[in-house]
Amino acid sequence: MLDERWVFYKDVKAEDQGNGVVRRVLAYSKDLMCVENTFEKGAVGALHHHPHTQITYIVSGKFEFEIDGVKKVVEAGDTMLKMNDVVHGCVCLEAGKLLDIFNPMREDFV
């Protein structure tokens, strides 16, 4: 889907990440990537870091996020900025979806 102008949700493969998380890589170029992550209640996004700047928009649900050692509860409509190499992760408190934007694109996701 690299550089695809139109990406239809019905055509996007859902990738089971295990432990209640499903990823869908949506539109992307070499400089930018949009990814949807669906979490079941109790699912964990383990603490990690990467060389990409990431913005996360909470589409639905409620999550406890930790970013650079600070924990906050976020819900639908909230947004977080995670600069490159900042340690972050989450626990899903109420089933929901996250929309992640990465710069540059995550080569490890394709």
Image (spheres, rainbow, N blue to C red):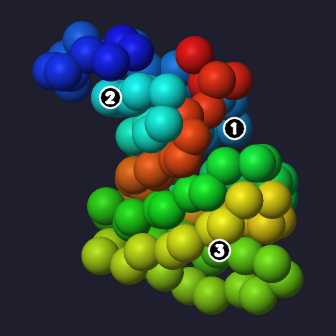
Give the residue type at disc 2. Ala
Label 1 residue SS: loop
Q: What x and y, as percent, mark residue 77?
A: 29, 76
User: How many residues crowd around disc 2 within 10 Å: few (fewer than 14), some, or many (20 or more)?
Assistant: many
Query: For the residues carrying marks 2 and 3, which lies nearer the camera in this image?
Result: 2
Whether residue 70 sits left or right of residue 57 in the image: it is right
Q: What x and y, as percent, mark residue 6?
A: 15, 21
Q: Quadrant of the C terminus?
A: top right
Label 2 residue SS: strand
Give the residue type at disc 1. Asn
Q: Is residue 70 visible?
A: yes
Q: How many marks?
A: 3
Return the residue at label 2: 27
Quadrant hosting residue 27: top left
Q: Is residue 93 visible?
A: no
Q: What x and y, as percent, mark residue 61?
A: 39, 66
Return the residue at label 1: 19
Give the residue type at disc 3. Phe
Task: Name above or below for residue 29 compared with residue 58.
Answer: above
Residue at figure coordinates x 67%, y 67% from the top left: 83
Residue at figure coordinates x 49%, y 62% from the top left: 55
User: How many residues crowd around disc 3 within 10 Å: few (fewer than 14), some, or many (20 or more)?
Assistant: many
Query: For the residues carrying marks 1 and 3, which lies nearer the camera in this image?
Result: 3
Asked whether 7 or 29 is in front, the reply is: 29
